[in-house]
Image (spheres, rainbow, N blue to C red):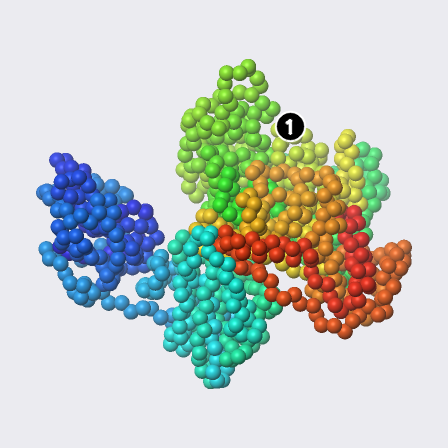
Amino acid sequence: MTIEAWVSPQHRNGSYIYIIGKGRTHRAGFSPDNQNWSLRLCGSDSVGISFLYRDADNASYHRWDSEKTIAVGDGWHHVAITYVFGEKGSLHGYIDGQPVKGAWDMGGDTGAAPLVDDDQVWIGSAMGGSPGSSFHGQIDEVALYRNVLSADAIKKRFRYEAPKPTFDVAQLPVDAVRVELYEGIPNRKSWDFRQPRFIEAYEIPTFAFLDARQKYNGDSVRIDRPNPYLLRAAGRVTLPDGEQRLLVRSRNSARVYIDGELIGQTPFHNISGSAHGRVVDPDRSLAPNIRPLQRGDQEKVFTITGDGGEHIVAFEMIVGGGNRRQTFGESSVSVATPDGDFHLLSPRDEMQIAVTDEAWLPFAAEQRQMYRELNFRRRAEIDEAKPYWDKRHAHAKKYVAGLEAIEVPAVNKLADPYQKATRNDVDNFLNVALADAEELPSQPIDDLAFLRRLSLDIVGQIPTPELIAQYQKQPAGERRAWAINRLLADDGWADHWVGYWQDALAENPNIVNPTLNNTGPFRWFLYEAFQDNKPFDRLVTELVMMEGSSRLGGAAGFSVASQNDSPMAAKAFVLGQAFLGVQMKCARCHDAPYHDIAQADLFGMGAMLNRSQISVPKSSTVPGGGREGIVKSVLKPGEKITPHWAFEQLTESPDAAYLNDADDTREELALLMTAPENKRFAEVIVNRVWKRLMGVGFVEMVDDWETADPTHPELLAYLSRDFVAHGYDLKHLTRQIVSSDAYQRSTVQPSPFGFNYAGPAPRRMTAEQIVDSLFVACEKPLDAGPLNIDLDGSREQSNSTDFGVPSRAWEFISLSNERDRPSLAKPFAAPFVTTMESFGWTGARQNPIAEREKEANVLQPAILANGDLGERFTRLSDDSVFTALALEDVKIDDLTRRIFLRVLTREPDAEELAIFRELLTPGFENRRVDAPITKRGPLPRGLVSWTNHLDPRANEIVVELEHIVHEGDLPTQRLTPEWRTRMEDALWALMNTPEFVFLP
């Protein structure tokens, strides 16, 4: 027999769906297993063909599945099978006219005759019309034959011409490469597919493809692209005259064209995801200074002849595939003379970057920043939710305006010290309270101290000399307002907030093999929300809705709680603590003995997140049989809890008109939490921001308001209403606080009897602020390497996450080397993690952290004084700005002033100048040496990945790298060793002063 059909499948249900079959209809009078014969499709994102029948003895099924597949959603395909019942080996399958291999399973290829009865022939379904067996899509020209059609006859049914990358030349920019992204290609190692669906386009400066622009939904939240997808790029490039070598590198198979003609193709990714591969030494033979091919990438060199004229060069690559991450490696197209170095192809002369280690690493850092900017612009372009939120914020403003007004206290009748210490309404409230307590405001800090404090509080690092110079050029009476506006507009605003909410929301991703309570990396959702300055009610709503990508940084990453037996109850606990000040930790297992929270309250909120009932797991109960105590567990294991909101005391009923889906309990929860009628939400956020900036909160326990008694309730209410009325704008709230005189005063030690904010409380830098400030001061790159153990992109995406190459401290994670295998260590990242852990940071957050450990310990001064990061800060290597300063024609006192300004954001006093003059004078006049810049030879970086980490050489390489990291940066040879060590001692002294790690 022969069965053929044209099919266009659309649905990805992962099961077997029927094209046509006889029997198995589940009609009365027939056996439910009476499959006479059938042709089906099977799979998810891509589907193969499947032939199924039951033998005449009704003993077993016999099934044949094809290896080759077709992509779901990419249009019409022709499928066929031919089979002679009773002849083993006679089954042949065809997709798009081409024979496909396959395999028998279940009963196997026994040649058994089929079951034959009088049941019906159905097209597009079986089993009584079961949705799981029904075809979703289109079927046409189904045909059955009582004979076997030849392969040639079936081949003629389908005509195929491989699509070439075509670009409208008029659309190609003169000075950039146009990149186009396409979806709807099959998940297989083949270029045989129909023209895919165009999705979007953007421009980049070169033929280097280290990443692609992220995909976003209408809320501007990251979502997944289909796996795989296609990248096409083209640009106008001048090819040098004469014989040239064209180097094509790609993570997966890629093709390159010149003026529409195919030049060549690289192979498909073909590295096993096991851990038993071998370490391969880098090959540097292609060019004198070539950056070697990175593990996981493919490369091909093609010889072309240039004519010095302009040509259209096109590149296309299949991104991802299988179940691997959609990685790019160092995909690129570059050109070189037969014996010269390669340079990236680019329409711009200045962007023809050399493919060498020295040039590539800074270029790659620039590319990472470029993609952040591309993503930022893309989110603004496609934000479909803004009109909805504008409408909600207009309602919020109207709601607040309708409340009874809060009278701002007058200070004009107070004594002069209080009147002079008033800059805005915040001071009016505080100074009246200070006067009542007969406590004077502390003295204002000077301009440079203010800038240092402000920079640390807003962008999370000390100010740069360039910022200081701009600041000091402003008129004295305007410079502080200028600095506030300047820093609030800086992207560092987002960097500084991410670490705080990683703690508060228990972000807990793992670099390898997720285990108990690991989340997805929703850090990127947080970063982009703060970068976009999303209104905070919108940010929280999107977090609660948990949409987007769970693995690539979308809000859905918050929904993940690996190996947790009640993940939505766990998320309800986090959300209640973070945004409502409701502490429900105890309620996970029993009614809270010291809080007015029942276990059913937590699980009811969890059920709202779950959008259906949830069962109480056995782990969330207290064993009985003992003496009666204060801990009581009312719920029983397995008991079903329906979705309900148990915190009516926190909020009035919000307007249901702002629900897009009134039946969605998760959306209902988001509205209940963030609507203006819920004053607790705004007050909790204001209190968190206030404590972060002033050191002490109106309510000191920011996550537990059970017995909250705010120290300044009127000011808290005033700021909360102002926050709501200004669209939940966190920058507006921050501006209100940092513009106050109270914030700009010298610090005051808190009293156990109360705190009246005569000035802010003393604060030590956070771990992230310390690390970021060290590297801002010395201007060295972090050089921590990629936070990824799957460097070659060979593992399944569910087992490994790529956290990128960090440029700020919040991007680090727990290195999770519980296996204690040296080969899985990250030697260049480890010093950062160790330093931050000493100052209270943790990358493993099983539970939310409201406040880090603040107490000093012996590790903190030890790690700065003797650790690897402190060594990198002080070491005068040739990439240190302090080396450059020391090599200038400068006097000792001027040099001292400049390093003080860089490290401590102030000028040295006379005594300090004298101390540093005495330290640096010996050898100063002859300190400079005519010597070349010191360069370290190539290091064995990037050679070890998960796929070869069991090779004994992998351990040796990583241990060698650990020794290199511990030795530190190579010192410059352009300064005499004796004087260089004196300068390093000076830097060491400044770094280890309490003044460096404490805010002014």
Residue shown at the point (25%, 47%) measured from the top left: 105
| Quarter of the N terminus within the rendering | bottom left
> Residue 703 lies in what quarter of the image?
top right
Tell which of 674 and 614 is nearer to you: 614
The residue sitting at the front extreme is 952
Task: Judge from the rendering whether residue 660 lies leftward or rightward of residue 362; answer left or right.
Answer: left
Residue shown at the point (45%, 48%) measured from the top left: 798
Task: Judge from the rendering whether residue 623 lies leftward or rightward of residue 52; answer left or right.
Answer: right
Residue shown at the point (42%, 72%) measured from the top left: 256
Three-letter amino acid code of the residue under disc 1: Thr
- Point out residue 926 in the picture as x, y percentages from the top left corner: 84, 70
- Point out residue 18 in the picture as x, y percentages from the top left corner: 23, 48
Mark 1 residue crowding within 10 angstroms, few (<14) / some (14–19) / many (20+): few
Tell which of 668 and 78 is nearer to you: 78
Q: How many marks?
A: 1
- Point out residue 272 in the picture as x, y percentages from the top left corner: 42, 55
User: Which residue is disc 1 drawn over?
Assistant: 707
The residue sitting at the top extreme is 627
- Point out residue 482 in the picture as x, y percentages from the top left corner: 72, 57
Q: Can residue 221 be seen in this view?
A: no
Q: Can residue 274 be seen in this view?
A: yes
Tell which of 600 and 132 is nearer to you: 132
Task: Judge from the rendering whether residue 932 lies leftward or rightward of residue 356; answer left or right.
Answer: right
Mark 1 lies on a secondary structure that is loop
> Residue 228 lies in what quarter of the image?
bottom left
Residue shown at the point (22%, 47%) measured from the top left: 108
